[in-house]
Amino acid sequence: MSEIRKSWGLHTGVVALLLALNFILPDYHHGNLARVMVLACYAMGYNMLFGYTGLLSLGHALFFAAGMYGMSLTVQHLGWSAGPAIIVGLASGLAMSLVVGILSLRTAGVAFMIVTLMFAQAGYLAALYFGEYTRGDEGFVIQKAARQIGGIDLSDPMSRYLAALVLFAVCLFITLRVVQTGFGRVLVAIRENEERTRMLGYDVHLHKLLAILLSGTMSAAAGAAYGLLFGYAGATFASVQYSIFPLLWVLLGGAGTVLGPFVGTLFMFYLIDLSSDISTAYMLIAGLTLVLLTLFAPQGLVGELRRRTLRWLP
Amino acid sequence: MELVPYLILGLLEGLVTAAVLSLMALGLSLVFGVMRVVNVAHGEFFMVGAVLAWQIASLFEGHPAWGFLAALLVAPPLTACIAVAANQLVLKRIEYDPERTIVATIGLLYIIQQVTLMTYGPDARPVEAPFNQRLSIPLVEWTESGLSLYWPWGLGTTTYKLAVIMAAVMLLTGIWILMTRTRSGLLMRATQLDRETAQAFGIPVGRVYATVFGLGAALAALAGVLIVPIQQAHYLMGHDPLLLSFIVVIIGGLGSLPGTVVAALLIGISDGMISVFFSPTLAKIIATLGVAFVLIFMPQGLFGKRGL
Amino acid sequence: MMLLSTRGLSRHFGGLKAVENVDFDLPEGQVRALIGPNGAGKTTYVGLLSGRIPASAGSVTFDGQNITHLPAHLRIRAGMAYTFQITSIYGRLSVQENVALALRWRKGGNEAATTKRATDALERVGIAKRADQLAGDLSYGHQRLLEIAMGISQQPRLLILDEPTQGLADSEIVDFISLIRDLVGEMTILLIEHNIHVVMQTADAITVLNGGEILAEGTPGEIRKNTAVQAAYLGTK
């Protein structure tokens, strides 16, 4: 029981710390951290499927982009306000993950990776094909006037940071709660030994599908929020690169840990931020990190911490 | 212009695509067949072949054939060396675990691509073809005075394109002989069938893996050298061919040489045909969704016997 | 009353008839051993019972219900428990969590009740002291016991054990025999077993499979005397 209390304490502490940082960070890092928190939600969504359920998707950009376009296209072309538009974004993510889940779960392992990659590629190409609405790679800016919820102007740095923090806290606590319930433990059991889990009386297929729905919808929430808070939607967010990023963040931070996605996103963000001052070839850092991680630290930062000292970390 | 010349043009362009694609996909398929891993960085070996071809060719003056010939002889082995180094430094250490290999080769993809960007730069650069005569293609038509030939405007190809098709046919035959008639081929096929047993019989599995990975990369690089007089060398050029080779390998059935060639012809020609008539983006959407559905509903591919 | 029956149950792999037209009845409360030479189709047969392998023909009835087309996890929920021939546990989870996973889907079971039942099961097989270790760190014999604990903790109507004593030391086999005897009256047991000593010590009745078909059925004494069985199986031992 005390382990559960400890982990709630730790994660609440992290959220409180991020809240405190809102008031003391200089502008540049304040903006960065808001971005990192939203992207960390994407990573947490990815982690639900990859870290806890053991399904390696190479196509999560499809869900992120579904949220982003679901939100931004309704704002842009139907003139909806931000609140309902976010719901459309979430619904697009949910629908997309349902379709992709039902189809791709007929495969496993490497075939699953390639099928998800192909679906996401088709989604990216579709964003280019319908360039009339999406303006393709160039993308479009979401007007300042549309970026408001209940009178709060989300383009203002302070409210943007707080909105990002709210979303981050929601995703973090959902993950923490799921991991502690029987459902989450069955996901881990599926990751560890699928056939054994089936033969203990669990509907493995249903659990995997629910994990994809949760993961895809969380990714879509991050996509919708990213578009809304930073005022831009473009096809780059649907590209292969954006499917690789969450994998990278989660591997770096620690797959199958609640805090890992945030830690990984934060590290990678600043790593790329610093190196892009030096060179345009900033993706080199991403490549090197991926190779070094697979070679030397497959558990990631938080994963290593758990292995060495804090066994109770969720 | 009428429909027939369009179709012939599409067919010819498609054959060139198919020739290059079959070499590249064969490399991918060989690596998967023998080593049971998917090499996501395969497209970068294609790109490295093309970029090296430009570097090598630019060292030569005089007739372009010398530079091209040098590139053809030097670029593939050099690329193979890079691949073997990657195999020894990375893949071997993670013991060819299928999922970790994919993650690691995604890393390799970015490393190779970005290092090229830093050294070779973001420009697209051409290599001059060793020979490049234009050939017009006549069609037959029925006129009042009986059968006669005519030359539709724009219908033609070049000697170089025909040479690419010929070269691919020769190389594919060579690989087929290597796999079926030589001792190295036997070792590879034995390893492909059963790694443990091969090891028990004293086959140096480690060396076979390194060779196969190098050979696969050399084939991709060769495809890159052959394409570079038609299409310029650029650091991002590996992306589309990678996707197309995935499609070819999945449809042809992984690890099957005849399947790969048939699928390359199918994809190359239909790519040529579709892009004559449809927008290339729509063609790609259809193709990628097609691959996904083949994998979901026919995991053995259209010709192969084994799934992923 | 028959707990489990199969009628005409068959499974073909291409041309190979792994299980052919098996009629089988298992009364409630019995300990039944399923024996036969290698390749006789024993594992395939229990795969058909538990739903891991779909049947080519025939039917399976469990507790009066036709379960031929029921997916594996629902058969487990209907009261079967299954242990694998090759040890299949969660190596990176704790011993306690391994057993808890076997119990958690039960309705009305809160975490405290689950923990208690898991501990009871571990005590029964004698590895309760190791509850907090990682299952992968256990010795091979203890891993097999853990797998049996996962089976009996579910308090199933039917416990299927696929070669549970394979690879166990002699002393561990003695403990296993007394464990099975201890379970009599609590659950029906179907035991695939190579070790004929274990079979003779535990089984109420024996079914002999050969070439995918039932060769003989009877009490241990009858099977011992059966010449066809001696020729096909015991003679080779």
Image: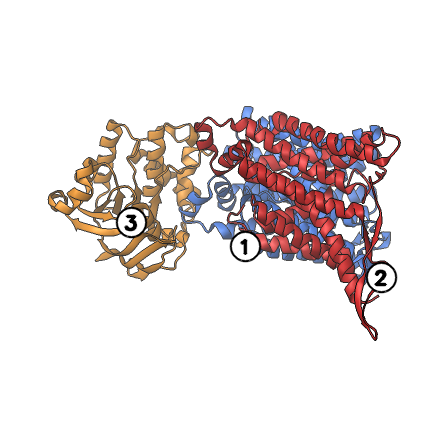
Instruction: Tell me the kind of residue under disc 2.
Output: Trp
Q: Which chain is red?
A: B
Please state which of residues B51 and B173 is positioned toward the viewer in this rendering: B173
Please state the horizontal and vertical placement of residue B280, each as a whole percent of the image. 77, 55
Residue indicated by mark 3: C158
**Mark 1 belongs to chain:** B
Residue A163 position (above or below residue B64): below
Q: Nearer the viewer, mark 3 or mark 1?
A: 1
Q: Are marks 3 and 1 in contact (CB under 8 Å)?
A: no
* Secondary structure at numbered mark 3: strand
Q: Which residue is mark 2?
A: B151
Left or right: where C183 falls relative to B252:
left
Residue A79 seen in this snapshot: no
Label 3 environment density (alpha carbons within 10 Å; few <14, some 14–19, many ≥20): many
Residue located at (51% from left, 32% from top): B187
Residue at the spot 61% in from the left edge and 30% down from the top edge: A294
Residue sticking out furthest to the right: B62
Camera-nearest label, 2 or 3: 2
C-alpha separation, residue under disc 2 versus residue under disc 3: 82 Å
Q: Colour of chain A?
A: blue
Give the residue type that dot 3 points to: Leu
Q: Amino acid at mark 1?
A: Met
What hue represents chain C?
Answer: orange
